[in-house]
């Protein structure tokens, strides 16, 4: 199964996926291409070190969001990708793009959705005073962090947590959650029934 991973930053989630494939934890899946909206994203260096094709599509080099997404779509189709993985990708994809790739885009969000969608999920959790937070891997729909949930990992929120200390604790779980979800997908164990994702035993 051919994956594309979309990144914008450091790429620690990408690295977790690379490592899970290289170690054989995830079988019958390969990363065909890593695409970033940031040409200088360290995630691209991680991909290059792993001999994975990289493509940078700069938004400001495109006349419109449609052109930007058309370039991303072309890169995905050129490699025959079957699943698009958003791993620290910081752009909102249009409803048209999401509909074209319906049920073929997976995202990881650093909070227990539906709590704290959007930016700075970790900060929202600390500011709200919740006792638990975590991360969510979900299929992307046309909303913001609102698609069917594949799996979640929970972490405690300590009284003296800052946004950064909580983010670090959640990130450890992200690196477990994303490979776990991709393994289930690659093994054909995920089915979507309305809002629900059922995992075959
Ligand atoms: C992670 O917290 C992820 O949940 C969020 O972006 C952060 C950095 O991800 N979407 P990465 O290290 O670039 O994979």
Image: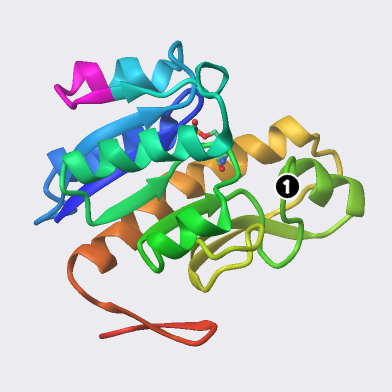
Residue lying at 73% horizontally and 47% vertically, measured from the top left:
121
Who's the residue at 80% across and 34% down the image? 162
- In the drawing, does residue 79 fall left or right of residue 141? left
State yes or no: Cβ of the residue under disc 1 lies below 8 Å from any atom of ligand 1. Answer: yes
| Above or below: residue 24 compared with residue 43 | below
Q: Residue 163: x, y in percent?
A: 77, 35
Give percent across and percent down for residue 190: 31, 77
Pick out the residue farthest to the bottom: 193
Farthest residue in the front direction? 63
Quarter holding the N terminus is bottom left
12 in relation to 102, above or below: above
Please say which color scheme the image uses: rainbow
Residue at 35 percent across and 30 percent down: it is 35
Instruction: Indicate which quadrant contains ligand 1.
Output: top right
Instruction: Measuring from the top left, give residue 77's x and y in whole percent.
Output: 22, 45
What span is in magenta?
47-54
Residue that sits furthest to the right in the current view: 128
Q: Residue 144: which quarter of the image?
A: bottom right
Q: Quadrant of residue 120?
A: top right
Q: Quadrant of the C terminus?
A: bottom left
| 43 displayed left or right of 24 | right
Check the image and report above or below for 150 versus 93.
Answer: below
Picture residue at 40% right of the left edge, 57% below the top? 105
Residue 82 as seen in the image, left or right of residue 194: left
The percent position of residue 23, horizontal first and vertical second, equals 14, 42
Question: Could you say which is closer to the camera, residue 124 or residue 156?
Answer: 124
The residue beneath circle 1 is: 121
Q: Residues within 10 Å of mark 1 (few under 14, many from 20)?
A: many
- Assign a secondary structure to mark 1: helix
Please tell me how many numbered marks the rendered image carries: 1
């Amino acid at each position: 199964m051919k994956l594309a991973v979309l990144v914008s930053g450091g790429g620690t989630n990408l690295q977790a996926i690379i490592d899970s494939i290289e170690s054989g934890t995830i079988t019958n899946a390969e990363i065909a291409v890593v695409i970033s909206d940031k040409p200088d994203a360290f995630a691209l260096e991680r991909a290059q070190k792993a001999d994975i094709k990289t493509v940078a599509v700069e938004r400001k080099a495109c006349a419109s969001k449609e052109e930007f997404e058309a370039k991303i779509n072309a890169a995905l189709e050129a490699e025959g990708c079957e699943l698009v993985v958003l791993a620290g990708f910081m752009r909102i994809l249009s409803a048209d793009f999401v509909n074209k790739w319906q049920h073929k885009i997976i995202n990881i969000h650093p909070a227990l959705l539906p709590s704290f969608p959007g930016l700075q999920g970790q900060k929202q959790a600390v500011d709200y005073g919740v006792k638990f937070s975590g991360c969510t891997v979900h299929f992307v729909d046309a909303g913001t962090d609102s698609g069917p949930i594949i799996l979640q990992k929970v972490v405690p929120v300590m009284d003296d947590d800052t946004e950064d200390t909580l983010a670090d604790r959640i990130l450890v779980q992200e690196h477990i959650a994303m490979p776990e979800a991709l393994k289930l997908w690659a093994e054909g164990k995920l089915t979507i029934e309305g809002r629900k994702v059922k995992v075959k035993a």
